[in-house]
Image (cartoon, helix red, strand yellow):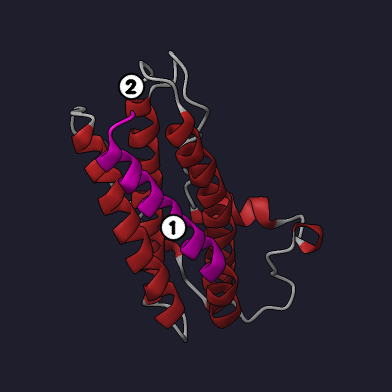
């Protein structure tokens, strides 16, 4: 979309995504005490896939470059759904970690980004976006180890999703008209 208001909203969104990406390592440091759980891919324990599945930690939707098959509306819906997933996950984790302040700050930034995505959705006059039903993660966090792993995985996946959002927003600002 070439609408100046839309482009300003895209830029505000990119700024929020940058803030989220910058704040994830600090939130991880304050919330995850285990030295074996780091945000460095080369140090990632190999057995976390089992824990991810047993805890039922959802993955965000896949984002792609805008095209006639992957329209702006689809992209905004998927971003919205993914952000709702992380709102839910961080909400469940905030009540279980010993120092939730950084997670709450991330949650607030995600809420602000979701507001910007909703504005873009409205500017494009698209149908109402998807409403995420919730993960139920809190009921599966039985001990400190599960909380640590869930926090680590949620922040690592959020980082990856935020990078995808940033690429999508950059793509939106450069997109040709007609892909909405």
The C terminus: image quadrant: top left
Report helix, strand or loop for mark 1: helix
Instruction: Report if residue 132 is visible in the image.
Output: no
What main secondary structure does the magenta stretch of the protein show?
A: helix
Residue 40 x, y percent position in the rendering:
74, 63
Question: Residue at horizontal 30%, vertical 59%?
Answer: 111
Of the pair 52 and 87, the residue shown nearer to us: 87
Report helix, strand or loop for mark 2: loop
Residue 62 x, y percent position in the rendering:
51, 34
Instruction: Report if residue 146 is visible in the image.
Output: yes
Q: Are marks 1 and 2 in contact (CB under 8 Å)?
A: no
State yes or no: residue 8 in magenta. yes
Residue that label 1 marks: 15
Of the pair 130 and 147, the residue shown nearer to us: 130
Q: Residue furthest front?
A: 4
Mark on residue 180? 2
């Amino acid at each position: 979309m070439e609408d100046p208001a839309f482009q300003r909203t895209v830029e505000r969104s990119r700024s929020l995504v940058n803030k989220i990406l910058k704040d994830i390592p600090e939130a991880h440091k304050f919330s995850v005490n285990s030295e074996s759980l780091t945000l460095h891919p080369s140090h990632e324990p190999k057995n976390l896939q089992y824990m991810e599945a047993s805890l039922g930690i959802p993955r965000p939707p896949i984002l792609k470059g805008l095209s006639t098959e992957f329209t702006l509306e689809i992209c905004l819906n998927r971003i919205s759904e993914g952000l709702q997933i992380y709102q839910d996950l961080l909400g469940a984790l905030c009540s279980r970690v010993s120092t939730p302040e950084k997670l709450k700050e991330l949650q607030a930034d995600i809420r602000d980004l979701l507001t910007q995505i909703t504005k873009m959705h409205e500017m494009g006059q698209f149908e109402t976006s998807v409403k995420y039903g919730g993960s139920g993660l809190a009921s599966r966090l039985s001990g400190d180890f599960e909380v640590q792993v869930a926090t680590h995985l949620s922040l690592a996946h959020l980082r990856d999703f935020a990078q995808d959002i940033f690429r999508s927003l950059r793509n939106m600002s450069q997109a040709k008209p007609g892909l909405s």
